[in-house]
């Protein structure tokens, strides 16, 4: 089931995508929650949502709506670095050491952006880069989750671009500043519920800049599969419904090219993951800042 946040005639709603239509869940069934996090955490609500059809009231053409970021207020937005074997190989070629364990960092939630919204090129950034990633939203809370049980805590999956200001990333060993500029967390286009992804470790992933393929890989090349990621994180913190994780990027980032190829205003970046969908964002100059 594809679940989306969307805006239609100035009203933002939660919807279920059926073909080329969107069903307004709360309008069609007032018992259903009107936020995606609550919906994903409720097996009963998900069951009722699955039964709704486009023949019922509250359906609109997908072409007439604006798709928004599906999750906008996660308690945590965590990202995993250096998690694809092909990305590790290109890092070694550039003399970058490979960490011996999972390396997680925060993207601040204020960076979350819509799946088709513009991404700002900050005035203070000279090295803007892209990273195609598979996103995970937690649907069931847990602490000390076993690897065997970990995928049962996944509410669904989405497409993400971990937009990165490389020069700012290099300024801090935590990476947080270089990963958290406003608009640098486009996600979407919706959440595909976990039951529809038979094997999250067997999905083709690719990224294109202006139609040119820059990244093309498979989630099968992850060093640490998603279940291991969740088990590892839950040793430290309780994972809550609505928390989002992005799970690493494959080879082909702009920084690793010879010479490096960074993003500039006017570039269009598209990330595709088979079985989930795509997001596409245009890079635009950062709007003029107001004086303090």
Image (tube, rainbow, N blue to C red):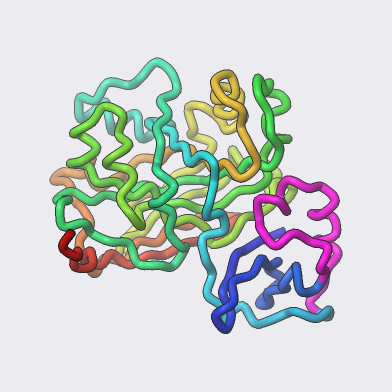
Residue drawn 67% across the image and 40% down it: 154
Q: Pinpoint residue 212: horizontal percent, then vertical percent.
A: 31, 61
Residue drawn 21% across the image and 56% down it: 122
Quadrant in which the N terminus is drawn: bottom right
Is 127 drawn above or below residue 53 in the view shown? above
Of residue 187 and residue 96, the one placed in the foreground of this image is: 187
Is 181 drawn above or below residue 26 in the view shown? above
> Is residue 175 located in the magenta-colored stretch of the structure?
no
Q: Pinpoint residue 190: horizontal percent, then vertical percent.
A: 59, 60
**Can the viewer see residue 211 in this picture?**
no
Q: Pinpoint residue 139: horizontal percent, then vertical percent.
A: 68, 42
Toward which corner of the image does residue 50 lie, by quadrant?
A: bottom right
Horizontal arrangement in the rendering, residue 233 relative to residue 111 (left or right): right
Quadrant in which the C terminus is drawn: bottom left
Of residue 274 and residue 279, the one placed in the foreground of this image is: 279
Q: Which residues are magenta?
A: 29-54
How many discs appear?
A: 0
Toward which corner of the image does residue 284 lie, by quadrant?
A: bottom left
Q: Pinpoint residue 133: horizontal percent, then vertical percent.
A: 45, 46
Is 133 drawn above or below residue 27 in the view shown? above
Residue drawn 38% across the image and 31% down it: 82
Of residue 88 and residue 188, the one placed in the foreground of this image is: 188
Residue drawn 58% across the image and 70% down it: 6
Is 48 drawn above or below residue 57 in the view shown? above
Horizontal arrangement in the rendering, residue 66 relative to residue 172 (left or right): right
Q: Point out the residue furthest to the top here.
A: 100
> Is residue 40 located in the magenta-colored stretch of the structure?
yes
């Amino acid at each position: 089931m594809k679940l989306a946040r969307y805006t239609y005639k100035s009203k933002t709603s939660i919807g279920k995508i059926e073909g080329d239509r969107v069903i307004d869940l709360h309008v069609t069934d007032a018992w259903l929650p009107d936020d995606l996090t609550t919906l994903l955490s409720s097996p009963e609500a998900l069951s009722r949502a699955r039964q709704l059809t486009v023949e019922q009231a509250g359906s609109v053409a997908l072409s007439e709506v604006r798709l928004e970021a599906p999750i906008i207020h996660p308690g945590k937005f965590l990202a995993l670095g250096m998690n694809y074997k092909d990305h590790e190989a290109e890092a070694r070629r550039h003399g970058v050491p490979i960490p011996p364990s999972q390396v997680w960092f925060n993207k601040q939630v204020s960076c979350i952006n819509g799946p088709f919204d513009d991404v700002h090129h900050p005035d203070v950034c000279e090295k803007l880069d892209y990273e195609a990633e598979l996103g995970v939203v937690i649907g069931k809370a847990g602490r000390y989750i076993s690897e065997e049980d970990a995928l049962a805590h996944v509410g669904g999956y989405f497409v993400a671009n971990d937009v990165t200001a490389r020069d700012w990333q290099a300024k801090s060993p935590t990476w947080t500043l270089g990963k958290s500029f406003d608009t640098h967390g486009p996600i979407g286009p919706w959440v595909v519920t976990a039951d529809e992804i038979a094997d999250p470790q067997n999905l083709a992933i690719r990224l294109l800049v202006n139609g040119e393929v820059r990244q093309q890989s498979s989630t099968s090349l992850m060093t640490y599969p998603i279940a291991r990621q969740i088990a590892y994180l839950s040793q430290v913190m309780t994972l809550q419904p609505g928390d989002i994780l992005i799970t690493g990027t494959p080879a082909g980032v702009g920084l690793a090219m010879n010479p490096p190829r960074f993003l500039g205003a006017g570039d269009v970046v598209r990330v595709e993951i088979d079985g989930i969908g795509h997001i596409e964002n245009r890079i635009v100059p950062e709007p003029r800042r107001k004086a303090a």
